[in-house]
Image: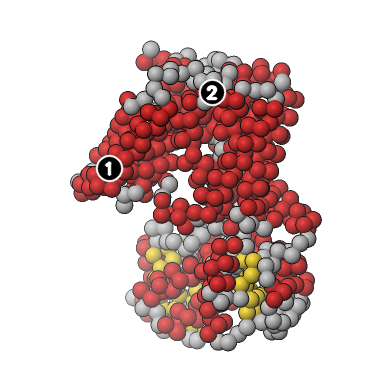
Amino acid sequence: METELLRDVVIIFGLSSAVLFLFHRIRMPAILGYLITGVIAGPQCLGLIRSLDQVAVLAEIGVILLLFTVGIEISLKDMLQIKRFVLVGGFLQVMFTTLAVLFVLVNLDRPLGEAAALGFMVSLSSTAIVLRIIQQRGEFDALHGRTILGILIFQDIIVVPMMLLIPMLPGAAVSRAESPLFIILKAMLLIAVVIVGAKWIVPEILYQVLKTRDHELFILFTVGMCFAVAWLSSFAGLSLGLGAFLAGLVISESPYSLHAIGNIRPLRDAFSSFFFVSIGMLLDLRVLMENTAFIIALTICVILIKAITSALATSIIGLPVRMVVLVSLALSQVGEFSFILSKVGLDSGIISPEVYQLLLDVTVLTMAATTFMIAISHRVAAGFSQLSRYDELDGIGKRQTLRDHLIIVGFGVNGRNVAMAARSKGIPYVVADVNPDIVRSEGGNGEPIYYGDATQESVLRHLGIRDARVIVIAISDPLATRQIVEMARRLNEDIFIIARTRYVQEVGALHSLGADEVVPEEYETSVKIFAKVLERYQLSRDDIERIVEDVRAGDYSLFRSVCEEAYCDANLKPMGKVIYTIRVPEGSKAAGRPLDELGIEGILAINRGDETLKPIGGLRLQEGDILIVIGPPEKIREVESMLTETASDSER
């Protein structure tokens, strides 16, 4: 039997690797790859897996580790920074979705307990899929990205109470020997024990463990604590998942949470793959093939319900139309934690095997649609913004008419710094931001800030775009930045446009749309690193400033050409190489010869008197030139020997 289990594990890992490689090439979520693996290997298709019960045990371990890492990753301090989105937005989204599903199913004469359980399951979205796509699109720091994150955090937290509630719903086939009140009291007692451990016991033990500098000991203790609390929770009649989640919270409040999550995540990924593969093995292809039209219609209904209820929730917390659309479409799928809840519902008798199969099919299809929904979200949002055509700018009509003023879009760190500089020099300015909390707090402090989405033409008009001298776009949404640049240039041909972007690939596009200056944070960080490196090699302050100015004047083309030489990564982090300065001495045989003839690689720049030159192939070296070269130490020595060799040296 042990050999058969090992055979099944090899099949699951091997097949998963192949499917995930394919899914990576076609840019589909990894979770769908695991589900497809389960379908292929399961009894409904090839029937490769034989030790189903033992695979189910491994899947249970995966669930425990999954909820454990969720607990670790939830920082109460971080939650407080986006508390409006977590507590208000998340609560409203879950409540509205659950009530909508409950209302529909009860009116279709489904049992109340089943309707409530399905409402719980449908209300959850896929944290793993959505956050990965948002991060890949560079929208994580945008307002809609933070809103999505806040709502997903609330959903991840509410999973645990839902797991406790489902077996208590009407129609559950569980023993009523214990009253719900007694179960809640036990849960509260367990939480109290965990809080005491988190504050006084576990941090001290972890400190003593880390003092040993024994990596294996730390992993063993962390995983052991996870399973110990999960076992304690199960022993008390509660779920394993609740115990694992609480164990994660214990770690999250210690200073060692980052170290723990870095060590546990690979283990979690390996075992959680068994969970998703086991779900795929339960997927009945016959049901999907026989009811294709019905399941697709049901999937569309679920997506619509989730999009509408998410839109309603985000509207209530004060987001503009464009943001509402972006958030609602991103959260329109059913998530991976719904699989966990569906297993709880099936085991407790709340939902039937037939309903369970339908839920699996719908969940998989909504997950598959996520990439498409997020891809079209910006176009749909732009369409809704045009249709609404209402003035979102709160109070802007009350301001005095300004001329030659500065417009600041976005009041994050960059926007605040620009406003502070303008205020200190007496430059008139107005600010637009789409975060109602920032607008309320800063407006109360006397800032000329207004609530409005600057991607709308009416908002820019009210900000006085036609009479403004400069507009600074300091937001983290790349697509919105492009829209604002294009619209600002169209509305005022003479305005000076400064745009901030996180990524250098946006520089060319923003310039082509009309931006006068584009400041990419990605390379500005590299410029600072580069300047610090040059300081350590005794270049004068004037020389460093000239090099930095040259880099910026050329739209960072110097860095782009360096990266093409494969000597550095996108942030100019030397990889096993050094940066060195070499002077061409008097009488050097290299003087007067072009660079392409010398074949020297890795030249960052050439300092010649008061000039900083780019290392183009036809440039001829002169005596006294200082070359800034990057490369392995042995390569640097070869270049130095070549440049310092004189005619007298060769004669000797």
Question: Upstream in the sequence, badge 1 or badge 2?
Answer: 2
Where in the figure is residue 36, as x and y percent of width and height? 58, 27
Outermost residue to the top: 1
Where in the figure is residue 220, as x and y percent of width and height? 28, 36
Name the element at disc 2. Answer: loop
| Dot 1 crowding, Cα within 10 Å, few <14, some 14–19, many 20+ | some
Name the element at disc 1. Answer: helix
- Which of the 4 image quarters holds residue 642? bottom left
142 w.r.t. 293: above or below: below
- Whether residue 407 is visible: yes
Q: Amino acid at mark 2?
A: Pro
**Along the viewing direction, whichever of 342 and 221 lies nearer the viewer:** 342
Q: Amino acid at mark 1?
A: Gly
Q: How is the image coloured?
A: secondary structure
Where in the figure is residue 82, as x and y percent of width and height? 50, 55
Tell me, for residue 120, which label it has, or none. Answer: none
404 w.r.t. 118: above or below: below
Find the distance from the CA under tag 1 to the CA under tag 2: 35 Å
User: What residue does disc 2 label?
Assistant: 170
Question: Horizontally, is 620 left or right of 287 in the view?
Answer: left
How many labels, in total?
A: 2
At horizontal 71% and vertical 34% (from top left) the residue drawn is 301
At horizontal 57% and vertical 49% (from top left) the residue drawn is 89
**Along the viewing direction, whichever of 330 and 568 lies nearer the viewer:** 330
621 w.r.t. 51: above or below: below
- Which of the 4 image quarters holds residue 613? bottom right
At horizontal 68% and vertical 43% (from top left) the residue drawn is 308
User: What residue does disc 1 label?
Assistant: 197
